[in-house]
Amino acid sequence: MNELSQFISNVGFPVFVALWMLYKTSNENKKMTDTINELKNAINLLTNEFKHHNITEENNHDTKGN
């Protein structure tokens, strides 16, 4: 029992810090993934809007030129 108590005393703090860092890193990765997905959606929306705008302008130029 004394050996177990001594082992926990010697190893407990590093294990706690490692688990805490793993938890914090996991949360940060989740936040970064969410942010990247939001940016991807915004880029897709802007790209689609740009394509639609260019198609509309091309159609306007074609009808004016005829």
Image (cartoon, rainbow, N blue to C red):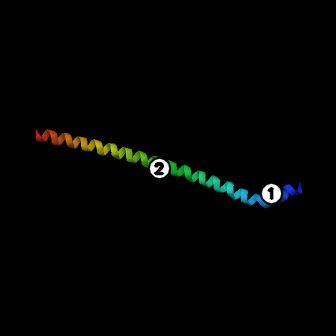
Q: Which mark is residue 8?
A: 1
| Vertical order, 37 against 4 (above or below) | above
Label 1, residues with CA under 10 Å away: few <14, some 14-19, many ≥20 = few
Residue 9 screen position, x and y as percent: 80, 60
Which of disc 2 and disc 1 is earlier in sequence? 1
**Identity, as a three-letter code, of the amino acid under mark 1:** Ile
Instruction: Residue at 26%, 44% (x, y): give it.
Output: 53
Q: Secondary structure at mark 1?
A: helix
Q: CA distance from mark 1 to mark 2?
A: 40 Å
Q: Residue 36: give its label.
A: 2
Amino acid found under the numbered disc labelled 2: Ile
Q: Mark 2 falls on what kind of element?
A: helix
Side of 39 where 16 appears, left or right:
right
The x and y percentages for residue 56 are 23, 41
Classify the position of the N terminus by image quarter: bottom right
Question: Relative to 24, is 1 on the left or the right?
Answer: right
